[in-house]
Image (tube, rainbow, N blue to C red):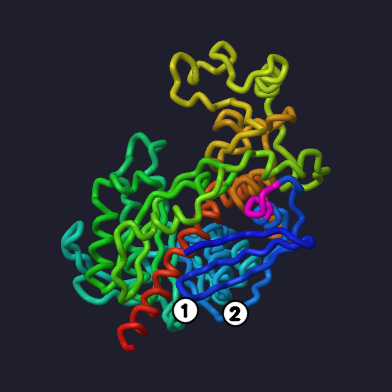
């Protein structure tokens, strides 16, 4: 697989070559003039332009579980558009009803189900790790989800807090780890041709071996499997964000490093923070999405200290006691760098004490709009529809917990091309 970009006549063209097929998409060029074509493409996308396909789009039907506000879904949609298709969200699933509404409002889901995932599917697992199998075929037991019918793609991002290194007490033994296996059961029960599951990299160290068990379950259910840890900054993002992905394709034997190879083919230079939010520097914000929270008096003093002394890391003597003397969280109360990719954006981006979230050029933390841009959400993606009362804590969760769409784009292309190559191989064999 190979993709190329070109800028001409205020348009940017993307050509994606997959085996014998060539797919072209075009986007209006509203990017900074000094950028290379690929960086200009993604910047135009961030600033709100949407690509138009030269192909006649065919639908890819998707179910998105543990979906949140739709970051992974957005990346998958971009990948589907890149190969000349159109994304149709047959159902989205999450316990956060408000996040479901944001997802539906922006991506047009046909069904949205606010329910706990284990209540949707009946399954039983025999064994652990590579030897794991389902005791019987998983079955959808939720009436609305059972009516979805045949789907092409199942995607899921089960809660990752149990795997995060920030959770020092229950790390790798959290009962939420079992939701990873529930995601596999849902995908198999729905008969998905393609399955994508994402999580934090430390999911591989889970006490209950969920990744190896998921791999065993998928293989025993007829899926070819590949997995990899991907970095958003390796794909051209302005943020250092790392996630683990597992893909499965029904009836396809996939090389173990298939996902890694596709990601390498899509590699692009990391972009600086200025690339993502430079045009928002002095945006006159009047609503919650475009305004920074008001810091406490002590945090105002810390921000001023950084700027007055031209520093990016707050010295120990200016920190609270809990962050002094050899703390491993050196980025806390830190000022961002204008000409570098940012650290991982989390749900704490509105608080200096949660990470390096102080704007590099303005004496404030970043706004939700800026955080969304860093996370890869384009301007047309509406986090505050008129009919909803949206608070800062909602925005922090929906933006900070999201999967960067550029990761979803790379993984989406991986699983889509694996399926396409499987069909091509069958055609060759028949010939």
- Label 1 sits on a secondary structure element that is helix
- Would you say the residues marked 2 and 1 are in contact, meaning their CB atoms lie under 8 Å apart? no
Q: Is residue 215 shown above or below 54?
A: above
Residue at the top extreme of this rendering:
317
Q: Quadrant of residue 316?
A: top right
Q: Marks 2 and 1: which is nearer the front?
A: 2
Q: Is residue 424 above or below residue 18?
A: below
Out of 97 and 32, give the one closest to the viewer.
32
Q: Residue at x 64, y 50 (%)?
A: 39
Q: Of helix, strand and loop, which mostly describes the magenta segment? A: helix
Q: Quadrant of the C terminus?
A: bottom left
Task: Kindly identify which residue carries mark 2.
Answer: 57
The answer to whether residue 281 is above or below residue 409 is: above
At 40% from the left edge and 47% from the top edge, which residue is drawn? 200
Residue 413 in percent (x, y) is at 48, 65
Residue at the image position 74 percent from the left and 63 percent from the top: 11
x, y percentage for residue 429?
A: 30, 84
Judge by depth and name the residue closer to the eye, 46 or 108. Answer: 46
Q: Visible in this render: residue 382?
A: no
Q: Mark 2 vs mark 1: which is more N-terminal?
A: 2
Element class at badge 2: loop
**Other-residue count near label 1 (Cα within 10 Å), few / some / many at <14 / 14–19 / ≥20:** few
Q: Which residues are magenta?
A: 35-40
Q: Position of residue 184 (x, y in %)?
A: 33, 65
Q: Nearer the viewer, residue 271 or 114?
A: 271
Residue 410 horizontal/vertical position (percent): 49, 58
Figure quadrant of residue 191? bottom left
In three-dimensional space, the C-alpha distance between marks 2 and 1, rounded to whole angstroms, equals 27 Å
Quarter of the image holding residue 167? top left
């Amino acid at each position: 697989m190979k993709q190329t970009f070109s800028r001409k006549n205020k348009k940017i063209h993307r050509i994606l070559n997959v085996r014998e097929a060539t797919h072209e998409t075009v986007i209006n060029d509203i990017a900074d003039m000094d950028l290379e074509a690929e960086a200009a493409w993604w910047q135009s996308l961030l600033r709100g332009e949407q690509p138009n396909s030269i192909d006649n789009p065919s639908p890819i039907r998707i179910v998105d579980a543990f979906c949140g506000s739709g970051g992974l879904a957005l990346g998958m949609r971009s990948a589907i558009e890149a190969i000349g298709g159109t994304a149709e969200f047959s159902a989205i699933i999450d316990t956060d009803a408000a996040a479901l509404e944001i997802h539906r409002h922006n991506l047009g889901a046909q069904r949205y189900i606010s329910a706990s995932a284990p209540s949707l599917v009946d399954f039983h697992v025999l064994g652990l790790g590579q030897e794991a199998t389902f005791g019987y075929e998983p079955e959808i037991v939720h009436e609305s989800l059972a009516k979805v019918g045949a789907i092409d793609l199942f995607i899921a991002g089960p809660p990752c807090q149990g795997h995060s290194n920030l959770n020092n007490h229950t790390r790798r033994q959290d009962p939420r780890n079992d939701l990873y296996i529930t995601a596999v059961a849902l995908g198999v029960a729905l008969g998905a041709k393609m399955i994508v599951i994402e999580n934090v990299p430390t999911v591989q160290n889970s006490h209950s071996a969920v990744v190896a068990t998921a791999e065993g379950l998928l293989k025993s259910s007829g899926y070819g499997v590949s997995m990899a840890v991907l970095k958003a900054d390796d794909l051209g993002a302005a943020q250092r964000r790392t996630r683990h992905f597992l893909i499965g394709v029904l009836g396809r034997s996939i090389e173990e490093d298939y996902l890694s190879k596709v990601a390498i083919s899509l590699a692009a230079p990391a972009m600086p923070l200025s690339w993502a939010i430079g045009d928002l520097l002095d945006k006159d914000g009047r609503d919650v999405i475009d305004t920074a929270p008001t810091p406490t008096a002590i945090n105002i003093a810390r921000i001023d200290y950084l700027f007055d002394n031209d520093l990016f890391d707050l010295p120990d003597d200016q920190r609270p006691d809990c962050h002094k003397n050899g703390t491993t969280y050196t980025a806390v109360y830190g000022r961002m760098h204008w000409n570098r990719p940012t650290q991982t954006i989390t749900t704490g981006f509105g608080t200096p004490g949660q990470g390096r979230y102080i704007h590099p050029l303005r004496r404030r933390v970043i706004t939700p709009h800026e955080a969304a841009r860093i996370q890869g959400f384009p301007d047309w993606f509406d986090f505050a529809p008129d009919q909803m009362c949206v608070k800062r804590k909602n925005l922090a969760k929906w933006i900070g917990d999201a999967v960067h769409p550029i990761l979803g784009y790379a993984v989406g292309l991986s699983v889509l091309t694996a399926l396409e190559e499987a069909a091509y191989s069958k055609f060759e064999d028949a010939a």
